[in-house]
Amino acid sequence: MCLPVFLLLRLLLEPLMLLTPRGVAAEGIGYVLAWAGYALLSRPLVRMLGRGAEWPRFLAAWNWATAFQYALVLLLSLLALPLPEPAQDLLSLFIIGYTLWLEWFVARLALHLPGLPATILVLLDLALSLCVTTLVVGLSYPG
């Protein structure tokens, strides 16, 4: 369910990247790396936090929250198209803040964690996403 929405969102935000087979392949690789990478990196961290038994429930909740985030971002991005650029920028900041909060909330709730450990899980996902995005951009454009 997430992949089609993810690709539509990427097409809206970075249309040139998906116009080549190389760009589509890079986005697909990035999507898999981001999802599987977070699952693999979060598991030992969750165990270190003493919440290993709750990790499967957390991962399922994180996955559904991510699907919701993609759909919400796509919808709001489409609605923002006719808005002036400052309004689009403000909406983008709201979306970023909301998605980070939602991921933090899911981590806190699913793992029964206090705020700081939940924040560490969000920062892990953010750092991984930045690394994967850098890789995807590098793979998308030749040279």
Image (cartoon, helix red, strand yellow):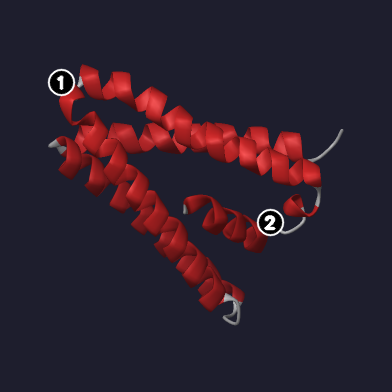
Q: In which quarter of the image is the C terminus?
A: top right
| Residue contact at pointers 2 and 1, CB within 8 angstroms | no
| Residue 6 percent coordinates (x, y) | 55, 54
Mark closest to the chain's N terminus, 2 or 1: 2
| Element assignment for label 1 | loop
- Under mark 2, the amino acid is Glu
Residue 14 - label: 2
* Relative vertical location of residue 61 with respect to residue 33 in this rendering, above or below: below
Residue 50 - label: 1
- Under mark 1, the amino acid is Gly
Residue beneath the point at 44% across and 38% down: 126
Q: Is residue 90 left or right of residue 113?
A: right
Q: Quadrant of residue 56?
A: top left
- Residue most toward the right? 143
- Residue most toward the bottom? 82
Residue beneath the point at 48% across and 71% down: 76
Judge whether residue 133 can be spotted in this image: no
| Residue 112 percent coordinates (x, y) | 12, 37
Q: 15 or 91: which is nearer to us?
A: 15
